[in-house]
Each structure stands twice: as structure tokens, then as C-alpha cells.
Amino acid sequence: MTTILLTGGCGFIGAALCRYVLNETDWRVTVLDKLDEAGTLNRIASLKHEYPERLRMWWHDLRSPINPVMLRAAGQFDYVAHLAAASHVDRSIVDPTGYVLDNVLGTAHLLDYVRREHRGAKTLVFSTDECFGPAPEGVEYDEYSAHCPHNPYAASKAGAEALCPAYAITYGMRIVVSHCTNVYGPTQYREKFVPLVAEKVSRGEVVQIHTVGGKVASRYYLHVDDAAKAVVTILDRGGVICGPGSGKYNITGDREYDNLFVAERIAGFLGLPLNYELVENPPNRPRPDARYALSGAKLKALGWAPEVPFDLGLKDALGLNRTVDHHPV
């Protein structure tokens, strides 16, 4: 039976991937998570009851090396999906060194473990569109565009990604990197844009909408279930660094939305007014990036495409029209 090690499996995207793998494949899943404020066992507790023989959970903070004895009972892994990461830009500005420890050192520890114990495993390192920095209007970065991170979070993810070809070339490991656009959906941690706006709208508070040069910032949005399917597609059919096919894949939504439109949509679905202010240079996120944009042609060539329409997915995220049986945090 196929086996996968999933780091960050109690996080927002990791739990969705865990759910998708267990529901749609016969793979065995071993989750490794440090269970911080953004990761909770509640996201996968029902899966453990439903699939007691196929799901294992281990606590570990990747700031420390992985003890191979801890995971030896799981046997050899065919796949490794490394989704564990600190991921909020605002907190990275307050604690940049912590983000380097979580994202760069944590990735090094994960790759070292795979190198020593599971060198044949195909390992996916989940990265972000923010590594490339802001995209000018009309530009979509491909997988091999130059990195130009503009905040400590993006820099830490770029640093983690830089380790991947080094390990692949030096040690002959089978590594693939994905970059993903903004993900949204049920059980997302409250500091992210969609749940944050929903909370502020529900309380009648003012929502800050970032602008750059007087223009509202925009992003490509992707439902978390589509992100999970993309990861499995890459593991199952994608190439690896220094191997046949591409060693990097962009995971992107199919439409770009500015953040004011998204906030208005959230307020509309909640049936409440949107009180907002446009902010050019917010103190919690100085000089924010105007837009991110990726080309998803390589991944679509593998047969993947987003399936969840934005309005349906947004209602799902707000708990108004659930597309799947998500479990609240």
C-alpha cells in the first residue's frame, strides 16, 4: 500500500490534503505536526475515527531534527508532502528569525530525515507565489522566474526552496516544489484575509483594504480542496528536479480578484454592511505587494484544474453552503 508522510497535517491546507488522500485513495497517511496556534487536532480527529488503520499522528517541532526511531513503525514512505510552515506575513514582520527557524531550518531537518531514511521517496515542498515578489500588470510568473521576496515570510519560503535543488543534485533525492496562490476555505486560521474579514464584518468593525499606488491589491484565490487535489496530482504524475518532466509546478486559481471585491462578496453573503477603509501603507504590513500572479500551464498539462467556483467556495468558507463535511476548529 502507498504510504505518505505529511508534515503540517493539522494545519489548514495539510488537513484538507489529509482528508482528500484518505477519502479518495487507499494510501496510508502519517501526519507530523507541532500543534501550534494554527494547527489543531480537531481538523483531523474525525478522520482518525473513520480511518484508524490508515492514519497515524506524531507530534514534532521541525525546528529540531527528526528522530528516525519515532517514525520507524510507519515503515518506508513512498511520498513526503512537506506543508509544515509558518505562513502569516504580519507575524513574520514581528518575528523574522522565528520564520527562518520554522521554514528554512525546518525544511532542512525534513530533507535531512528523508535523505537518511527514505531517499527514494518523492518529496514535495509546498511553497508560495510570494517568493517571486509582486507581479506587474499583465505578467504571470512561471516556475523558474527569479525570486524577489519582499517580506520575511516570503524570504523564508524562498530560502527553504533554495535547499531543494541543492539536496536533489547533491544527494540524488526525488524532490519537487510547488508554488501556490492564496488559498481559502473552511477552518482557515482567523488571521487570514477571508476569515478575518468575516469576523470584522460580523462585529461591525472597519476592514482595512490594502492599496498600492492608489490601487487595491489583488490575488488569485484557490479553494483548499482544489489545492489538495493539486498536491496529489503532482505527487502522482509530476516530475522531479533533475529528472524527467518539470521539477516545479505552480498551483493557481483561474481568476484574479481584488481584495475589496472579496470583502464585498463576504459581507454580501453574510447579509451585513461592509465598513472599510483603504490603507496605502499599513503599520502591520509596510509596503505590501500589489498583486501576485502565476502561470499554471505546467500543472494543467498534468490534468489538474480548479473545480470549486469562487462564490460556492466562499460560501463554503463562511459555513453557508458546505461542499464537503469539514469539521470546525
Image: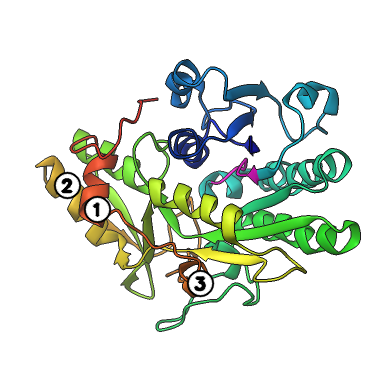
Work out which quarter of the rendered image holds the C terminus and state it.
top left
> What residue is rendered at 33% in x and 40% in y?
195
Q: Which residue is mark 2?
A: 267
Name the residue that disc number 3 marks. 134
What kind of residue is marked 3?
Pro
- On the picture, is 210 further left or further right than 206? right
Compare residues 169 and 62 and report the one nearer the observer.
169
Residue occupying image coordinates x 63% and y 66%: 248
Verify CB contact (< 8 Å) between mark 2 and mark 1.
yes
Relative vertical location of residue 113 with respect to residue 247 in this rendering, above or below: above
Above or below for 71 versus 242: above
**Residue 184 in picture, x, y percent from top left:** 37, 47
Q: Is any atom of residue 127 visible in this view?
A: no
* Quarter-of-image position of residue 321: top left
Tell me the magenta residue range: 81-87
User: Can you say which quadrant of the picture contains the N terminus?
Assistant: top right
How did the renderer colour the structure? rainbow
Name the residue at the front extreme: 1
- Residue linked to disc 1: 263
User: 237 and 5: which one is in front?
Assistant: 237
Is residue 277 among what the camera can see? Answer: yes
Report how far apart the C-alphas of labels 2 and 3 lie in the structure: 27 Å
Badge 1 amino acid: Ala
